[in-house]
Amino acid sequence: MTGTVRLHRIMRAPAERVYRAFLNPQAMAKWMPPDGFTADFEHLDARVGGTFKASFTNFTNGHSHSFGGEYQELVENELIRYTDKFDDPNLPGTMNVTINLKTVTCGTELSIVQEGIPEMIPVEMCYLGWQESMAALARLVEPEINQ
């Protein structure tokens, strides 16, 4: 049995900026790890068929888990679809992540579906992690800094 997470957010930022934040490794290292974790992106090739490899490290105890995947579909400023798999054999299976972006009057409507979460990871913990990540994403993409 695997889990599924469905998220919906409105970001006060243009779709281009939100889209870029999902494909830029420096941006992802800033917003993606849940609170209390750091991120390291070994590589990220943001094109259909391209792959990525990353790890999150628990800042408190130093334990890390690595993961990677492949981009399945990219529609600029509208859609990102990729696979994701943990390197840990105790976290088996391949997850599928779909990110839909839609321009709305006040910014971008963001819908995320993560399917195939290994059964040993509580879905509520995934929701909590994603909520923390979405707050960090908003802090990155929403400010209008003109310098």
Image (spheres, rainbow, N blue to C red):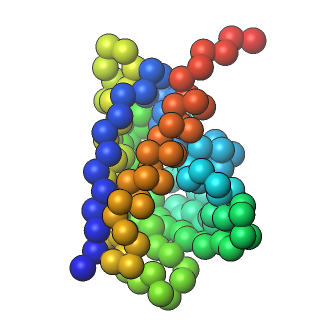
Q: Nearer the viewer, residue 103 or 109?
A: 109
Point out residue 73 in the picture as x, y percentages from the top left corner.
Answer: 37, 53
The quadrant the C terminus occupies is top right
Apparent side of residue 103 relative to residue 147 in the rendered image (left or right): left
Foreground residue among 143 and 101: 143
The answer to whether residue 41 shows anywhere in this view is: no
Whether 28 is drawn above or below 53: the answer is above
Q: Position of residue 129 (x, y in %)?
A: 47, 54
Classify the position of the N terminus by image quarter.
bottom left
Residue for point 54% across, 23% down = 142
Residue located at (61% from left, 73% from top): 65
| Camera sees residue 58 | yes
- Identify the residue at image location x=37%, y=15%: 106
Note whether 78 is above or below 10 in the view shown. below
Q: Position of residue 124 (x, y in %)?
A: 35, 60
Residue 8 appears at what percent x and percent y? 31, 39
At horizontal 37% and vertical 69% (from top left) the residue drawn is 122
